[in-house]
Image (cartoon, helix red, strand yellow):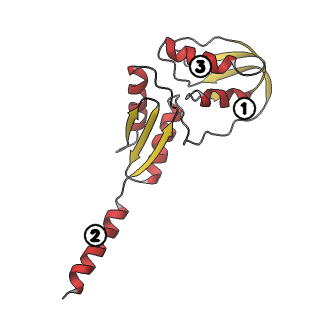
């Protein structure tokens, strides 16, 4: 009879482990205003049961399992945010004169300034036409698409560069 309580305890431990939440911590996420924080929360919440705990530029994504947590981080990237701890999709390294940037989060002037600082810090970039609320914009000069994407990611932002 003494084995039954031990067996139940072990069974409960395995059940708890199977139902444990999964957490992914991101740092350096662009979050300059209430709209950014709301955008981060909304992007993560698109995955059922996922939540974002936001502390300045740190975001902790929690979901019911690892696959859901990764899906929530992918949703965050799709919304135009990035943080160390996320895996950015590969960008083809091409030397270009013009690139279209799609999906970058630009809710306010501070977002545009952060994007501009990142963009203009890329060797060879001469100008861009990013504006508040833009869903897409162009970058011009003679630059590397991979360096442009990396600069945006370093600023806590994410976009498709084509």
Residue where numbered disc 3 is placed: 115
Mark 3 lies on a secondary structure that is helix
Judge the density around disc 3: few (<14), some (14-19), many (≥20) Cα neighbours within 10 Å: many
At mark 2, the secondary structure is helix
Which mark is first along the chain, 1 or 2?
2
Q: Residues within 10 Å of mark 1 (few under 14, many from 20)?
A: some
Of the image marks 1 and 3, the number of the one nearer the N terminus: 3
Find residue 39 and report its horizontal and vertical position in percent. 42, 27
Tell me the CA gap for discs 2 and 1: 48 Å
Label 2 or label 3, whichever comes before in sequence order:
2
The residue lying toward the viewer, choosing from 78 and 112, is 112
- Marks 1 and 2: in contact by CB < 8 Å? no
Residue found at the very far bottom of the displayed protein: 1
Secondary structure of the residue carrying numbered label 1: helix
Report the Cα–Cα distance between label 1 and label 3: 15 Å
According to the image, label 1 marks what residue?
Answer: 146
Return the x and y of residue 59 as percentages of the image width and height: 44, 36
> Where is mark 2, residue-wise?
12
Q: In this view, does 29 lie above or below 6?
A: above
In which quarter of the view is residue 51 placed? Answer: top left
| Tally of numbered tags | 3
Mark 2–mark 3 Cα distance, whole angstroms, equals 49 Å
């Amino acid at each position: 009879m003494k084995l039954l309580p031990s067996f139940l305890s072990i069974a409960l431990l395995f059940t708890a482990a199977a139902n444990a939440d999964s957490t992914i911590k991101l740092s350096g996420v662009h979050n300059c205003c209430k709209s950014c924080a709301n955008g981060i929360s909304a992007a993560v919440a698109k995955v059922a049961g996922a939540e974002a705990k936001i502390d300045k530029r740190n975001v902790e994504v929690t979901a019911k399992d690892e696959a859901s947590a990764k899906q929530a981080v992918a949703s965050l990237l799709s919304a135009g945010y990035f943080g160390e701890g996320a895996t950015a999709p590969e960008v083809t390294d091409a030397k270009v004169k013009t690139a279209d940037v799609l999906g970058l989060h630009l809710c306010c002037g501070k977002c545009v300034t952060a994007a501009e600082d990142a963009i203009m810090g890329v060797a060879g970039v001469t100008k861009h036409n990013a504006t508040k609320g833009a869903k897409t914009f162009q970058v011009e000069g003679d630059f590397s698409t991979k360096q442009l994407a990396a600069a945006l990611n370093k600023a806590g932002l994410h976009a498709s560069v084509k």
